């Protein structure tokens, strides 16, 4: 009688095992891995990679081996119990695709509008991350990668006047997607998603690079050789112009005037929206910045329409090559350095604000300093 009672349960378990075994024949890496995990579970084990199986206590390892000996006719079971199925790489983009089904319980009962408002912030956060850091496998997301994404947001808060809360929401939605996939897929990853939130006013506190650091480290022969040509030129152009990275990346050929009596760039809302009306301005080109722009007289095609990854690329390079004066220093600190040099030289506030694209806290009268005057004032301050 007891055997009769257990028969349906045993049959159901066998059916599940067969289905998992059949799924193991799939060419899809994720399906193959999932099948191995389910097959191991049906045999009473948790799926482990071959490296982790090898580290098991002797008794547990022998138990798995003995079980596989009973399954010699079924190589799928052997692979499932001894970690013979390679764990698939899940990219950030793929993680978002998986998220919708893994988190479907959170969508229950939501209206179309609520679903729209639930989905869109997560899509935006993933797109922002990929734009800055690339479509990485989630097991390759390191603390440094997250710092690059954080630094990009700090710049957006500063440049566009956005609230730090907007950045923090992006971090939250990104973390929700990655943690859900990590947990539900039982990947066992330690994701660096803590201690990255921005504090109010943080974007304004970044230190400038010192003159000595710029001269002796950033401009040291060969120091920037590992950067791609366009990123390196934008970096150098920023040193003596103080222009925002996105402003330089977005320059069109008509905004670059290398053959003028005084070489300069004119930042205009051509094919893009500037931060404000004050951001429209003319800046003379001097020293290393002039030489860098001469290498790209038509601008920077690689970054003109997709500058999101520029800061991340440069910040990662600076950090990995010991070129950050302190851990708080990023590419954007060159802009602060430029402003500090002008202040130390006693350059009039109106001229400083005109060059930086900042608001003047009083009415602007007249045309301001001429290009020649600005060039003469900046010449002694340039590298």
Image (spheres, rainbow, N blue to C red):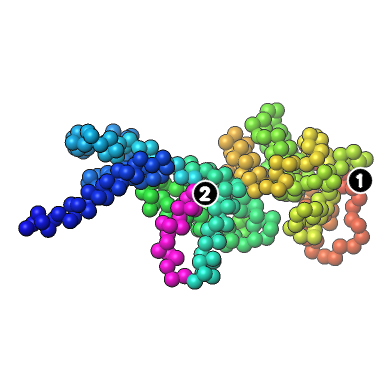
Q: Secondary structure at mark 2?
A: helix
| Image quadrant in which the C terminus is located | top right
Span shown in magenta = 93-110
The residue most toward the left is: 1
Query: Residue at point 48% right, 53% down?
Result: 97
What percent of the width, then of the height, locates residue 173?
51, 58
The answer to whether one can see residue 140 in this image is yes
Q: Which mark is residue 93?
A: 2
Q: Within 10 Å of the Cα at label 1, are there few (<14), some (14-19), or many (20+) other Cα atoms?
A: few
Residue contact between numbered discs 2 and 1, judged by CB atoms under 8 Å = no
Q: Within 10 Å of the Cα at label 2, are there few (<14), some (14-19), or many (20+) other Cα atoms?
A: some
Q: Nearer the viewer, residue 167 or 11?
A: 11
Mark 1 highlights which residue? Answer: 372
> Does 145 appear above or below 128?
above
Q: Is residue 317 left or right of residue 239?
A: left
Does 113 appear in magenta? Answer: no
> Does 252 appear above or below 53?
below
What percent of the width, then of the height, locates residue 53?
29, 36
What percent of the width, then of the height, locates residue 202?
61, 56
- Tag count: 2
Q: Quadrant of residue 30?
A: top left
Query: Residue at point 79% right, 64% down?
Result: 361
Q: Is residue 260 left or right of residue 287?
A: right
Does 109 appear in magenta? Answer: yes
Q: Is residue 135 left or right of residue 237?
A: left
Query: Residue at point 76% right, 60% down?
Result: 276
Query: Taken as a whole, is the magenta stretch helix, strand or loop?
Result: helix
The answer to whether one can see residue 324 in this image is no
| Disc nearer the start of the sequence (2/1) | 2
Judged by depth in the image, the label closer to the viewer, 2 or 1, is 2
């Amino acid at each position: 009688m007891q055997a009769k009672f257990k028969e349906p349960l045993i049959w159901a378990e066998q059916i599940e095992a067969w289905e998992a075994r059949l799924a193991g024949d799939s060419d899809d890496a994720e399906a193959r891995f999932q099948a191995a995990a389910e097959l191991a579970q049906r045999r009473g084990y948790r799926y482990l990679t071959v490296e982790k199986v090898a580290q098991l206590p002797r008794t547990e390892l022998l138990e798995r081996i003995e079980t596989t000996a009973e399954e010699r006719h079924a190589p799928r079971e052997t692979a499932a119990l001894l970690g013979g199925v390679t764990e698939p790489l899940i990219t950030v983009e793929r993680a978002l695709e998986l998220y919708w089904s893994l988190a479907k319980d959170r969508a229950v009962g939501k209206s179309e509008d609520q679903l729209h408002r639930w989905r869109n912030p997560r899509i935006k956060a993933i797109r922002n991350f990929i734009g800055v850091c690339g479509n990485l496998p989630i097991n390759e997301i390191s603390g440094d990668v997250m710092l690059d994404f954080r630094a990009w947001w700090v710049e957006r808060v500063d440049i566009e006047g956005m609230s730090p809360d907007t950045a923090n929401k992006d971090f939250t939605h990104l973390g929700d997607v990655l943690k859900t996939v990590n947990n539900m897929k039982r990947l066992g990853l330690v994701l660096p998603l803590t201690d990255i939130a921005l504090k109010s006013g943080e974007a304004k506190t970044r230190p400038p690079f010192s003159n000595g650091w710029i001269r002796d480290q950033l401009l040291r022969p060969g120091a920037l050789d590992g950067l791609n040509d366009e990123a390196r030129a934008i970096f150098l152009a920023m040193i003596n112009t103080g222009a925002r990275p996105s402003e330089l990346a977005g320059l069109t050929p008509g905004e670059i005037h290398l053959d003028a009596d005084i070489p300069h760039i004119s930042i205009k809302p051509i094919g893009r929206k500037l931060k404000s009306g004050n951001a429209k301005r003319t800046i003379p080109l001097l020293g290393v910045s002039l030489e860098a722009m001469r290498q790209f007289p038509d601008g920077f095609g690689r970054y003109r329409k997709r500058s999101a990854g520029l800061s991340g690329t440069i910040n990662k390079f600076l950090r990995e090559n010991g070129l950050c004066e302190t851990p708080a220093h990023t590419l954007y600190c060159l802009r602060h350095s430029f402003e500090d040099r002008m202040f130390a030289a006693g350059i009039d506030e109106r001229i400083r604000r005109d060059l930086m694209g900042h608001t003047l806290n009083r009415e602007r009268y007249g045309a301001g300093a001429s290009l020649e005057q600005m060039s003469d004032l900046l010449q002694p301050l340039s590298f």
